[in-house]
Amino acid sequence: MRIVIADDAVLLREGLVRLLTESGHEVVAAVGDGDALVEAVVAHRPDVSVVDVRMPPSHTDEGLRAAVEARRRVPRTPVLVLSQYVEVSYADDLLATTGGGAGGGGIGYLLKDRVAAIDEFLDALARVAAGGTVLDPEVISQLLVRRRRNDPLAELTPREREVLALMAEGRSNTAIARALVVSDGAVEKHVRNIFTKLDLPPDATNHHRRVLAVLTHLRA
């Protein structure tokens, strides 16, 4: 594969160059900042780029932003991002580039520790180059935790979710009862539980709480 490497740490960058070259790949550019990464991707159209999240000048998310810009400039260009720590917001931003103007293409997000497991790293690189998505197990774990924490419907039971979905279709409690083959009283109980779990204000009218519940469902 033809590969671009972007990492401001010279030792790691040169180590990656040597590792990839000895594995039979061609490193077409090895750079140390985000602007140079974008230029290299545009100039070389590599099969995949390996990019550090944190690069000069602020050492925050320059690498990630450069990767996103590179994918905007060269749609579907595969990128494998390396990070010292799990940065959940960065992982979310990167995954967002798999659609829209970024045009899809392979995406990977690994912790730098994974590079030490050479076969695992090379396999991940090949999968990203082939258009796949590779996420570090620790990244997946933290993404799931964050999404569960931020999901306003997380506390609802499967039956309550069904009731809420039917409410969103504009059905009355009686119509919901017929659809689910339960009593009107059972639906009323589910609706009360939904209002409580979604923390909807009890001082609002029942109609207003119903609207607020539906809006929460549509936004989730």
Image (spheres, grey):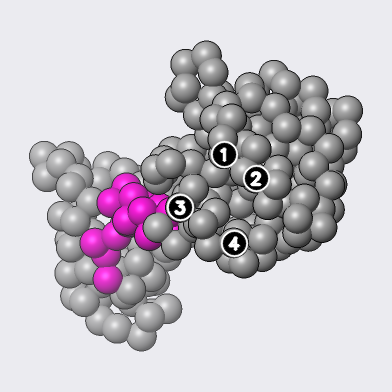
The amino acid sitting under disc 1 is Leu
Q: Earlier in the sequence, mark 3 or mark 1?
A: 1
Q: Secondary structure at mark 4?
A: helix
Q: Earlier in the sequence, mark 4 or mark 3?
A: 3
Mark 4 = which residue? 118
Specify the principal SS of the magenta part: helix
Mark 2 = which residue? 16
- Disc 1 versus disc 4: distance between alpha carbons? 14 Å
Mark 3 = which residue? 113
Q: Residue at coordinates 22% horizontally, 68% vertically from top-left?
A: 190
Instruction: Answer few, some or many: residues within 10 Å of disc 3's Cα (few below 14, many 20 plus, some between 14 and 19).
Output: few
The reply to whether the magenta stretch includes residue 53 is no
- Residues rendered magenta in the picture: 139-157
- Disc 1 versus disc 2: distance between alpha carbons? 6 Å
Can you give x and y, in whole percent of width and height, for residue 4 in the image?
A: 76, 38
Instruction: Answer few, some or many: residues within 10 Å of disc 2's Cα (few below 14, many 20 plus, some between 14 and 19).
Output: some
Q: Is residue 172 above or below residue 151?
A: below
Q: Residue at coordinates 66% horizontally, 33% vertically from top-left?
A: 6
Q: Is residue 68 above or below residue 138?
A: above
Q: Is residue 156 above or below residue 69?
A: below
Q: Earlier in the sequence, mark 3 or mark 2?
A: 2
- Image marks 1 and 4: residues in contact by CB distance under 8 Å: no
- Disc 3 versus disc 2: distance between alpha carbons? 13 Å
Q: Residue at coordinates 63% horizontally, 22% vertically from top-left?
A: 33
User: Is there any visible trace of residue 81 in the rendered image?
Assistant: yes
The quarter of the displayed image where residue 205 is located: top left
Mark 1 = which residue? 12
Q: Secondary structure at mark 3?
A: helix
